[in-house]
Amino acid sequence: MSGFESLSKPLKSQSEVTVHTFHPTLEQKPRAKYNVPDWFNHNYAISYDAERSRNVSHQVRQDGRRLINETYNESWWNKHDNDVRISNRLDEVDKWRKALEYTIQDVDREVQTMQSVKEQCERYLEHMRSPLDITLENHVTRDGRKAIDNVDDEAERELKKEVYVIDGIKRQLHQQVQTAFDQIARLTEAKQQLIRDLQDKHTAFAICEENLQLNEFSPNIGYKPDACRPIKGQITPEEWVAFSKYNKDRAEKEIYESTRLRESIFHTIGQSSSDLESQGKASEYALRKRLHELERSLRELEWQKKQTEEEILSNENDIDRLEKAVRDKEPLIKLAMSRQENRHSRPGMDLVRDEVTYGLCDEIQQLTAEKRALEDRLKQTKHAWNILQQQLHRIEDEIAVKSNSVMLESRALETRRRLNTEITPSTETDRNRQLLNMDTSGLRHVLQSIY
């Protein structure tokens, strides 16, 4: 086919045309190319880095071996030093254990001796009886006073003076017995403190001994969480020594005080008795004076109660009137509000704010203010009523207290009048009993067990 013929043929569509692309023969994908010197440098760097890594590894291995030796030696010496410390601690704890045991034995001997001396003093005190029945019974009777009436008044002081005057010897011996009892209690307390300290020492010794027997091959060892944490209650060695020394010194001081007390008990002499009759009159006068004061106070409280009740009644009437006044205001307020609300429904131009509107608003405000004032006054009146009720209850409680005190003081005076007839002996036998301070009523055992 000639060229002209090909030109005379119709053209093909774009989809039927095949496009042919021509490439050079040596063309390749673009990528990085290195120079020959770079290739040699790269190989040299790998060899150099490998040799340097081996050197570093060798140095690390040598340092690790040296560290193993050093840590082994340090660990061994640390364990050895701590073993020595634990051993020294065992010796120190054992020394204090023996010191505390010897001190406990001394305290035991002193407690037994002090108990024996106390029993001797009590037996001697039983033979020093005196006529304390009337005064002690008055004390027991007046101890029944309640609340504010249980005061240390003149009658109380006179009765105490009467006890002292009746028998100074008995009082001194009783004080010595009480002092001996307190001393035994202090010795026992010091002993208990020593025992607790000794028990702690035994526990600490057992723990230290167990720790000393432990080694790295023991089966009952293991990691403990935060073993070096600060424990609450830890103290310094100086404080530990000071604590045990304080317990030992305290026990030795109590032993010394107990020895002095035993000497004082052995050399205690009774005191002479004073005039019982004059002191008895002084006590009776103080009781009568106190009874007169109580009766006068009781009458005053009864008058106060009557006045308070009358005021409460008046207050209740006022409350009723105020409540009624408040209730009466409510319809008026409703009326004024309803009128005002109805006037809001006026149509159009008739919805004017005239004098009627202002008048109704003023009326509503006035009525609301009056109701609020009445309610406030009602609240105040009720509060005053509550206060009056509380005061009335307080007065009634105080009347009960005063009535009880009047009864007790009257009983005490009656007891003294009854027992004063026994002061003068009617027979020779009664005279001998009084001289020998012999008790025939059996009341002395009960009263003196209280005092």
Image (cartoon, helix red, strand yellow):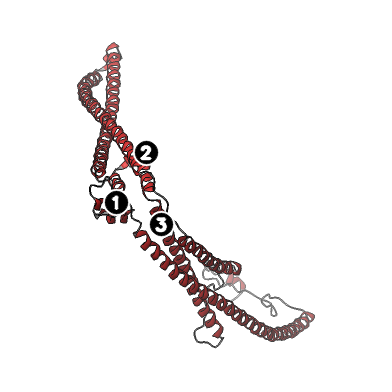
x, y (%) of residue 161? 38, 44
Q: Residue at x 45, y 61 (%)?
A: 265
Q: Residue at x 29, y 47 (%)?
A: 134
Residue 271 falls left or right of residue 451 = right
The amino acid marked with disc number 1 is Gln
**Quarter occupied by residue 129:** bottom left
Residue 15: percent from left, percent from top: 51, 69
Q: Which residue is mark 3?
A: 173
- Residue extending farthest to the top is 355
User: Tag 3: Cα neighbours inside 10 Å, few (<14), some, or many (≥20)?
Assistant: many
Q: Secondary structure at mark 1?
A: helix
* Of the pair 61 and 297, the residue shown nearer to us: 297
Distance from disc 1 to disc 3, alpha carbons, whole Å, reads 21 Å
Front residue (pair 337, 368): 368
Q: In which quadrant is the N terminus drawn?
A: bottom right
Q: Badge 2 is on which residue? A: 154
Q: CA distance from mark 1 to mark 2?
A: 28 Å
Q: Is residue 81 above or below residue 440?
A: below
Reading the image, the residue beneath label 1 is 434
Image position, residue 115 (x, y; %): 41, 67
Disc 1 residue crowd, few under 14, some 14–19, many 20+, Cα 10 Å? some
Indicate left or right for 106 with 378 as reference.
right
